């Protein structure tokens, strides 16, 4: 009997990204992902509800990290600065995952259904940020606006981070995006 190999979930994620890149998302079955990972289809479904869940896990560590980081920002910070600090802090989740993030985004970009799911995920993050701001005493529409603008800056920074040949670290790109936004709104 072979020795049990650890990190079944990570192996399934890796296998899925490889197959999605090679064959396309639609042409890849959960059974094939499990086989590539050296696991059973049953094991796949213990970790993921379906093959989209590999790209969009139900438990969203970014959402949790943003909420935690925002809670640590001083109450005196302006809403957009609080969002910026939370985004920069949460970007640490991506530090060691550049290649994985690039591959994941390429799969999403190649599939309209996955693009729609990504937009839903981002809207959920914006809602969570806005709610956290409201708990800090920021009224609407300022809470929603700061959350949406912060995520727009994050999207731009993330796009640069995965597409530039020698990208700066993601927190730096987030700050740059927000600084550019401030310059645009100031008419510079």
Image (spheres, grey):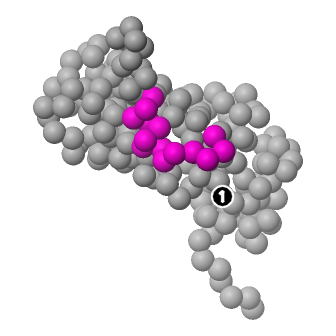
Residue 111 or residue 1, whichever sits in front: 111
The residue at the point 74 percent across, 88 percent down is: 2
The residue at the point 44 percent across, 36 percent down is: 174
In the rendered image, residue 30, in percent from the top left (x then y), is placed at 76, 54
In the rendered image, residue 65, in percent from the top left (x then y), is placed at 37, 48
Name of the residue lying farthest toward the left = 76
Please give the range of residues in magenta.
164-177
The residue at the point 41 percent across, 20 percent down is: 181
Relative to 115, is 72 on the left or the right? Answer: left
Relative to 75, is 96 on the left or the right? Answer: right
Give SS at disc 1. Answer: helix
Task: Return the residue at label 1.
Answer: 13
In the rendered image, residue 92, in percent from the top left (x then y), is placed at 42, 52
| Residue 62 visible at all | no
Q: Quadrant of the C terminus?
A: top left
Q: In this view, does 12 lie above or below 156?
A: below
Q: In this view, does 5 lie above or below 41?
A: below
The residue at the point 21 percent across, 26 percent down is: 78
Name of the residue lying farthest toward the bottom = 1
Q: Is residue 113 above or below residue 10?
A: above
Relative to 80, is 151 on the left or the right? Answer: right
Residue 147 or residue 188, whichever sits in front: 188
Residue 141 or residue 79, whichever sits in front: 79
Name of the residue lying farthest toward the front = 188
In the rendered image, residue 75, in percent from the top left (x then y), is placed at 14, 34
Q: In which quarter of the image is the N terminus?
A: bottom right
In this rendering, the count of numbered labels is 1
| Residue 143 visible at all | yes
Residue 144 or residue 56, whichever sits in front: 144
Within 10 Å of disc 1 (Cα), the crowding (few <14, some 14-19, many 20+) is: many
- Queried whether the magenta region covers residue 70, the answer comes back as no
């Amino acid at each position: 009997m072979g020795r049990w190999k650890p990190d079944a979930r990570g192996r399934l994620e890796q296998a899925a990204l490889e197959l999605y890149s090679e064959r396309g998302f639609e042409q890849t079955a959960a059974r094939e992902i499990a086989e590539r990972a050296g696991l059973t289809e049953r094991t796949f479904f213990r970790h993921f509800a379906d093959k989209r869940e590999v790209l969009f896990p139900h438990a969203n560590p970014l959402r949790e990290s943003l909420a935690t980081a925002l809670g640590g920002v001083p109450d005196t910070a302006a809403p957009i600065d609080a969002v910026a600090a939370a985004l920069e802090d949460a970007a640490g989740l991506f530090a060691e995952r550049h290649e994985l993030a690039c591959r994941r985004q390429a799969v999403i970009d190649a599939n309209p259904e996955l693009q729609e799911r990504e937009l839903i995920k981002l809207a959920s993050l914006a809602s969570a940020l806005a709610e956290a701001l409201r708990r800090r005493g920021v009224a609407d529409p300022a809470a929603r606006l700061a959350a949406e603008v912060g995520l727009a800056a994050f999207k731009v920074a993330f796009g640069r981070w995965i597409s530039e040949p020698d990208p700066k670290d993601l927190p730096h790109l987030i700050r740059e995006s927000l600084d550019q936004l401030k310059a645009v709104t100031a008419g510079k």
